[in-house]
Image (cartoon, helix red, strand yellow):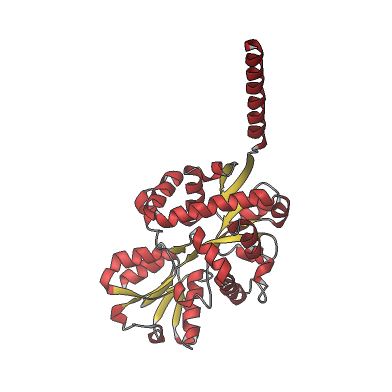
């Protein structure tokens, strides 16, 4: 009888071990390639997700691939080499064209500012006519200037608008050869730090967020999304969790990005205030109350202004609000 009990116990152990091994085998780890950009905006959430183990928690083996521009990322996605990517404002025109889907926004730029010399007698946008105002043509900084002028009914021709490179703008403000600038980071930092109380910021892009906006986002191709819903959900959860961590621990996030990109912490810290950094909780709220739709409509206004698109496109055709609400936020 004792031998029988020993045999049965031995068999039970074997069966239990096989059962456990089967459950382990059922946990599939998926390998994905994710594109990022080497600045705080384009690196922070993936670097946090990698360092804190959020990808591992979702059974994702992630290879991070550095890119310097959104169109190159999208081209690589369309060939199947990249599965998910971070993009800045410009590449969203490709999403509007249907080449990629926007999963959710990462942040909203507030980098662009109109900075004026106090001695020039400028305290508001209405004081700009007749003044020498430098900007960088073809950039978001020029768009901010036009939005600001249009809002108060001033014709651009009433100003002396000068096209300058960023470094020349800083020099010109320091030499007092121009009265004002509409420019973006890092040139805003340089001017404000160099001239201090001699200058003041009278407008930022955030002041015109209903008329124009520059969000960054996480994207995926429609084909990959249709064939890999589960991976899309797991990737989204990992990034959204990292975004929550970033919001709650912004200084540590700067250190993580500094290590990841092998950059000086102080240099990375300059980017901290260049955008409103969304948390996962922010995205859930924005997707529930409709404010995300308004954000992307404001972005389309910019593309219409620059003639990248001819008219408004239904946001729901490319921004995955319903999908995220049904498959990620409500699970």
Q: Nearer the viewer, residue 216 or 29?
A: 29
User: In the image as oriented, which residue stretches furthest toward the bottom?
Assistant: 153
Q: In the shown orientation, is residue 58 left or right of residue 99? A: left
- Number of marks drawn: 0
Q: In the shown orientation, is residue 197 left or right of residue 168? A: left
x, y percent for residue 24: 63, 33
The residue positioned 50% from the left and 75% from the top of the image is 209
The residue positioned 72% from the left and 54% from the top of the image is 226
- Looking at the image, is 122 positioned above or below residue 31? below
The residue positioned 50% from the left and 47% from the top of the image is 49
- Looking at the image, is 305 positioned above or below residue 232? below
- Looking at the image, is 69 positioned above or below residue 159? above
The residue positioned 67% from the left and 54% from the top of the image is 75
x, y percent for residue 238: 55, 50
| Rendered image quadrant of residue 221 | bottom right
- Looking at the image, is 273 positioned above or below residue 22? below
Image quarter in which the C terminus is found? bottom right
Q: Nearer the viewer, residue 52 or 213?
A: 52
x, y percent for residue 102: 62, 61
Q: In the shown orientation, is residue 250 left or right of residue 17? A: left
User: In the image as oriented, which residue stretches furthest toward the left?
Assistant: 197
Q: Is residue 48 visible?
A: yes
x, y percent for residue 172: 36, 70
Q: Nearer the viewer, residue 64 or 59?
A: 59
Image quarter in which the N terminus is found? top right
Q: Is residue 156 visible?
A: no
């Amino acid at each position: 009888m004792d031998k029988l009990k020993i045999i049965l116990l031995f068999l039970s152990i074997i069966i239990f071990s096989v059962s456990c091994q089967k459950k382990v085998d059922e946990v599939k780890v998926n390998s994905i390639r994710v594109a990022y950009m080497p600045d705080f905006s384009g690196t922070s959430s993936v670097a946090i997700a990698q360092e804190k183990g959020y990808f591992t928690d979702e059974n994702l083996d992630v290879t991070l691939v550095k890119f310097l521009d959104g169109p190159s990322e999208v081209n690589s996605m369309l060939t199947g080499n990249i599965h998910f990517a971070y993009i800045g404002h410009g590449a969203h025109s490709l999403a509007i064209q249907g080449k990629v889907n926007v999963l959710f926004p990462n942040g909203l730029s507030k980098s662009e500012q109109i900075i004026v010399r106090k001695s020039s007698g400028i305290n508001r946008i209405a004081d700009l006519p007749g003044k020498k105002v430098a900007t960088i043509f073809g950039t978001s900084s020029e768009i901010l200037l036009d939005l600001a002028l249009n809002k108060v009914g001033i014709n651009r021709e009433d100003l002396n608008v000068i096209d300058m490179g960023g470094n020349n703008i800083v020099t010109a403000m320091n030499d007092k050869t121009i009265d004002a600038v509409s420019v973006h980071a890092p040139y805003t930092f340089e001017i404000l730090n160099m001239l201090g109380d001699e200058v003041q910021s009278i407008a930022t892009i955030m002041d015109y967020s209903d008329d124009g906006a520059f969000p960054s986002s996480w994207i995926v191709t429609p084909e990959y999304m249709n064939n890999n819903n589960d991976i899309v959900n797991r990737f989204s959860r990992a990034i959204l969790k990292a975004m929550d961590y970033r919001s709650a621990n912004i200084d540590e996030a700067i250190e993580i990005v500094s290590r990841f990109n092998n950059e000086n912490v102080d240099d990375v810290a300059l980017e901290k205030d260049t955008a409103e950094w969304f948390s996962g909780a922010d995205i859930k709220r924005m997707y529930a109350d409709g404010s995300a739709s308004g954000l992307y409509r404001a972005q389309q206004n910019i593309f219409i202004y620059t003639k990248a698109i001819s008219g408004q496109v239904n946001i729901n055709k490319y921004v995955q609000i319903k999908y995220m609400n049904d498959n990620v936020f409500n699970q």
